[in-house]
Amino acid sequence: MNIVLLGAPGAGKGTQAQRLVEEFGVAHISTGDLLRAAVKAESKLGRAAKSYMDEGKLVPDKLVIDLVKDRLDSDDARRGFILDGFPRNTAQAVSLDSELSELGRSLDGALLVDVAPEVIVKRLSTRRTCRNCGYTGTEADVTCPRCGGEMYQRDDDKPETIQHRLDVYQSQTAPLVDYYRGHGILKSVDGDRPVDEVYADVKKVLGL
Ligand code: AMP
C-alpha cells in the first residue's frame, strides 16, 4: 500500500493515517511531524524550517524533498507508506513520482479527505496536539488521552495563521487533486463526518 493523502490542513489526514498505520502496519510519513521534530531538536533543518512554519508558509521544496527521500528509503517504508502532508505542490508531486520510479515503485492511490473551508477554520482553531506523542485532539482534551502528555495549541493553529495556511492550500496544494485525477489514481471521501465513518469509507475506496 503506497498512498498519498490530500486535503486541507485539519481535514483529518493525520487521524486517518494513524488508523491505517495501526491496522496495516505501513509507515506514516508526515512531513509536518518530521519538521516539527527537527524544530524541537534545533537541528540544521529545524532552524531553516522554523520561520516558514510559524508563518504558515511552505518550507522550501529542496528541504522537504530530501527529508522524504531519506524516509522512503528506510526499512519500514519499503513495506508500504502513507504520505501525509506531502506533496504540497506540483514540483513536489513530480519529484515524488521520479523518486518512486527510481526505487522501482509507484503510488497505488491519492486519497482526498474532503472538508469544506468553514469547517476547517473551526476545527483548526479548537485543535490541540500532544507535545509528547503528536496525538491530535481538541480543546476538551486537558491531557493526551493516548499517553497522558501535555496538550498544546500549535503556533500555526492560531487564528492569524489559519487563513494564510488555507490560502496556501487553495493556491498550491489543491491543484494536486487534478494532477492525480489525471494520473487515474484519485479517490475521495467526505471528511466532514465522525472519524469511524470516514475511516470505513477510506478502506472502502482504497479496496482494503
Ligand atoms: P502540517 O502538519 O502538514 O500541517 O505541516 C505544518 C507546516 O509544516 C506547514 O504549514 C509547512 O510550513 C510545513 N510543511 C509540512 N509539509 C510540507 C511540505 N510538503 N512542503 C513544504 N512545507 C511543509
Image (cartoon, helix red, strand yellow):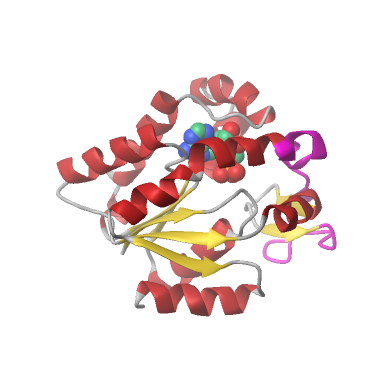
x%, y% of residue 198? 57, 74
The quarter of the image holding the C terminus is bottom left
Q: Is residue 114 above or below residue 207?
A: above
Relative depth, front residue between 129 and 105:
105
x%, y% of residue 84? 48, 51
Relative depth, front residue between 94 and 154:
94
Q: Is residue 36 something one can see in this rendering?
A: no
x%, y% of residue 82? 40, 57
Ligand 1's quadrant = top right
Q: Is residue 61 above or below residue 186?
A: above
Q: Any magenta on residue 150?
A: yes
x%, y% of residue 96? 30, 41
The quarter of the image holding the N terminus is bottom left
Question: How many numbered discs?
Answer: 0
Task: Give left or right: position of 205 versus 79.
Answer: right
The residue under the point 47% across, 24% down is 60
The residue under the point 79% across, 39% down is 158
Task: Give left or right: position of 208 versus 37.
Answer: left
The residue under the point 39% across, 67% down is 25
Q: Is residue 28 something one can see in this rendering?
A: yes
The overriding secondary structure of the stretch rendered in magenta is: loop
Q: Is residue 143 above or below residue 156?
A: below
Image: magenta residue range: 139-163
Q: Any magenta on residue 148?
A: yes
The residue under the point 30% across, 37% down is 94
Task: Give left or right: position of 55 versus 180.
Answer: right
Relative depth, front residue between 75 and 68:
68
Q: Is residue 185 above or below residue 61?
A: below
- In which quadrant of the rendered view does residue 98 lie? top left
